[in-house]
Amino acid sequence: MKKITIAVVLIAAVAFGLSAAGRAETAAAQGVTEDSVLVGNSAATSGALAAVGVPFNSGIEAYFKMVNDAGGVAGRTIEWVHYDDEFDGAQGVTYAQRLVEDDGIFAFVGHFGTPTVAATQEYLDAIGIPRVYYATGLRSLFDLTAEDGARASFPVQPIYDAEGEVMVARAVSDFNAERIGVIYPNADDGHGLLAGIELRAGMLNVPIVTSQVSPDASDMSSAAQTIVSGDVDVVLVAANQVPAEVAIKALAAAGNTAPVITSYVNAAPTFVEGVREVLGSFDVYANAWLQVVDNEGNPTEALDEYVEAVSKIDAGLAGNPYAQAGWIAAAVFVQGLERVGSDPLTWDAYIAAMEQAPVEIPLGGTVDFEDGRRVGTQAMSLLKAIYDDEPNWIVERPLEAIEDILD
């Protein structure tokens, strides 16, 4: 893969007039005309992850439609092209090359999924094309002082390491945990979450009991028994989607009664449906970096705007967190366009605009890209899984930074 990546970068360098010292100014404005700007992504819109990719793309589409219906930005409408990579890194590379070299997009909006993001990061950093919002918490995206082409990377949702710290803060502050259990898969999400968990647990001097599992394991009974026999006060299931569901069911079968906290990636009604049978044995919680209701439980103005726009595409997406994430990806991208305004729209101008001040996250807080800071948002709320006629999550704790959680 590395040989292929290097070859592709060389081809792109010729195509866009890049040199070893940097990229040409004329190349930076690819995809931009007087009346349009072309952006794109690839995402899993078929296969096992289609339930995530389809609504995610619908959220992007809904926001761009709202902006275009209002006249666009600085006289430009936003055109969007996307491909189905089936959550496969090799296909993700193919489509990234097509988007950059054939379609000539100005930016990626909603770069989707750990396999594709990981496989294309080196290539896209070398080119320096803007990427706004990653639908993954991939550890390699975390950068406190991004330079060169990496400055064109704009992660918004939390990165795994930071979320691991939040998990520990919640366990200690909200559940008075003195001993914490951790089940994590041998994969990027598991290792990233574990790194953050170990860091914050060490800072707070809280012992942890860990058990690693295979990400595709269908039987996690041994890992669950290790955690239950460790006499822990809270269990952190540091995994995404299917592995997390398997782990939680295994904990129930092993006799666990301690509350479980899992990743924000799982904070969807479909996940509650998958684990509904365990809810009578122990409570299941998930982090969330979105807050669609205020602290009194009333819908926010941002939610009302989202629901109105997305319902024009599919009313069933009104409460879908993946569609909300796509909406946010598009909204954050557009804020950069608005900051550039009527000035020449180049990559350098766009990057500078995104770094000039914190960017508002609709349905959430803010994210700060100043001085090369690329760590995503670090404020999260805590949701509780319930099944009352239908699967749902309710807000247990409001959107807070780690320092506020521990205060």
Image (tube, rainbow, N blue to C red):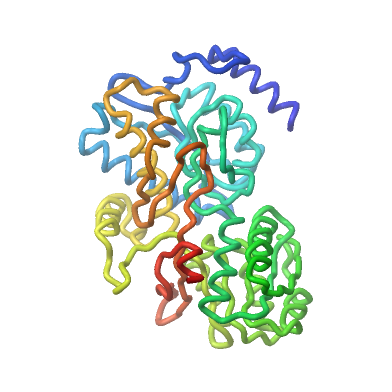
Residue situated in front as seen by the camera: 154 or 391 = 154
Q: Is residue 335 above or below residue 47?
A: above
* Of the pair 111 and 343, the residue shown nearer to us: 343
Position above or below: 219 against 1:
below
Residue at 24 percent across and 26 percent down: it is 75
Task: Residue 162 in the image: state x and y as whole percent.
Answer: 57, 57
Percent across and percent down for residue 54 are 46, 50
Instruction: Identify the residue shown where x is 49% and y is 64%.
Output: 403
Viewport quadrant of the N terminus: top right
Q: Residue at x 79, y 76 (%)?
A: 222
Residue 117 sits in which quadrant? top right
Residue at 54% x, 22% y: name it: 101
Could you tell me residue 374's position as x and y percent? 52, 43
Residue 276 as seen in the image, left or right of residue 398? right
Outermost residue to the left: 70
| Image height of 288 relative to 121, above or below | below
Splitting the image into 4 quarters, where does residue 147 fall? top right
Left or right, 189 with respect to 345, comes to right
Number of residue marks:
0
Quadrant in which residue 8 is drawn: top right
Residue 332 placed where, x, y %? 38, 43
Residue 141 can be seen, yes or no: yes
Question: Where is 162 relative to 80, above or below?
Answer: below
Q: Is residue 83 visible?
A: no
